[in-house]
Image (tube, rainbow, N blue to C red):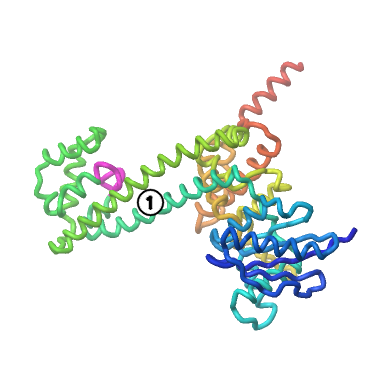
Amino acid sequence: MNKNFLYVGIDVSLKTLVTCIIDTSGSTILKPKSFHNTPDGLDTLMSTITSISSNVENPCVLLGVEATSVYANHLIYTLYDSPIFKGIEVHIYQFNPKLVKKFKESMGDLPKNDNVDSYVIASRIKMGNLPTECYVNFKQLGLQRLTRYRQHLVESIAREKTYMVSNLFLKFSKLSQEKIFSDNFGSTAEALLTEFESSEDIASKSIDELIDIIKVASKNRYADIYSTAIAITEAAKSSFKVNKQLDDSLSVVIRSCYENINSLEKSIKHINTSIKNQVELLFPNEYTILNSINGIGPVIAAGIIAEIGDISRFKNDNALAKFSGLVWSQYQSGEFEAEDTKLRRTGNKYLRYYFCLAANCMRKNINTFSNYYSSKFREVKTHQHKRALTLTARKAIRLIFSLLQEKRLYTPAEERSDAYRKSSNDAE
């Protein structure tokens, strides 16, 4: 029996769900109508869809929304898990807003409002060539919140450190120009840069006083504390002198930056523990497989699992790479095809982030990945690390997909070679 498709376009915002429904012929069955983005509003919307479906023989509902922040999440979760659609075939799709925008431009000079946008989304679904259907795994969603928040914390620390460095140059110019501390954000640097009000204060202290401060702050870990103290004194003397009012304000800012960084790093430690506990509990098999790869620990494994979910969603590693955005555009015309093309970056940015983290760790711990990274690094003279790491991440996807699909642990190439030689000798 032929299906009668109903194309449901929903323009989602913080407060409303503007919905338009068209049928296979392109006729508008439900003109754009606004529903509240609340549990009651969503119940009314679902009742409206089922009521319209009941008047159609063998209905198949294709529902689409734009991926706009988290505003559509409750809608998707409820539709996915609702018993009201029993007996009705429903497929849910999330579109990249860029795709909808380009499609809208092809429809002529349409105005920008929620009613028009819902109609455009419904028309885009009708056109076909749809993205991967929405996948909802409630076990995965909780882990995903943790791993995505961890990435947010890492990015926040990076921003805070970058901001602090600019203030550090104003206050202690030479200390930020030369590598005196092993880490400008470590305990020793923090003790010196927050205890003294200015570079002149540091320069005026005796070497013995500086040595005592360094010993306590570093827990006596410096191999040559005397040379470090001399270097700090010389750098303080060579720094620009700063006006007293500006100096006082910079001291407050730098002290606050250290407090923020320490607080964020403490939060990351807590989140890491929560991530490890959840991934071991909810995805023990996938976690064990990924954790068997040299260099991949609990956090990276959890980050990858939280975005992939069930590996059977992807028919091959190319599909997984496309989902993560680790694919390259093609530029070809006639007999010409460009070799230097851009990374698309239209996929799951969180999965791409964790794949790149995994690749960076794997190239430090696995010879085949290290050699591959080095060969790609030497191929070009610009953006060497970035390009080589991205290509290594693509190679890592092939391995990770294979292991998860076949449900087997990783075995290093050296061990596989030894096992093969042993089995050959036994056979002889």
Residue at figure coordinates x 63%, y 31% from the top left: 409
From the viewer's side, name the closer residue of 329 and 119.
Answer: 119
Q: Quadrant of residue 402?
A: top right
Q: Is residue 285 found inside the magenta-colored segment of the image? A: no
Give the total number of marks visible in the rendering.
Answer: 1
Q: Is residue 186 found inside the magenta-colored segment of the image? A: yes
Residue 272 percent location from the top left of the image: 45, 40
Left or right placement of residue 364 versus residue 175 in this view: right
Residue 161 percent location from the top left of the image: 34, 53
Label 1 crowd bin: few (<14), some (14–19), many (20+), radius 10 Å: many
Residue at figure coordinates x 27%, y 44% from the top left: 181
From the viewer's side, name the closer residue of 183 and 153.
Answer: 153
Residue at the farthest right position: 1
Residue 331 percent location from the top left of the image: 67, 66
Secondary structure at numbered mark 1: helix
The residue that label 1 is drawn on is 157
From the viewer's side, name the closer residue of 266 and 195.
Answer: 266
From the viewer's side, name the closer residue of 71 and 178.
Answer: 71
Residue at figure coordinates x 79%, y 70% from the top left: 23
Quadrant containing the C terminus is top right
User: Which amino acid type is shown beneath numbered disc 1?
Assistant: Ile
Residue 325 percent location from the top left of the image: 61, 56
Q: Quadrant of residue 123?
A: bottom right
Q: Quadrant of residue 322?
A: bottom right
**Which residues are drawn in magenta?**
179-189
Residue 413 makes an appearance in the image: no
Left or right placement of residue 260 versus residue 344 in this view: left
Quadrant containing the N terminus is bottom right
Name the chief secondary structure element in magenta.
Answer: loop
Establish if 420 lies above or below 230.
above
Residue at figure coordinates x 80%, y 62% from the top left: 54
Left or right placement of residue 334 versus residue 322 in this view: right
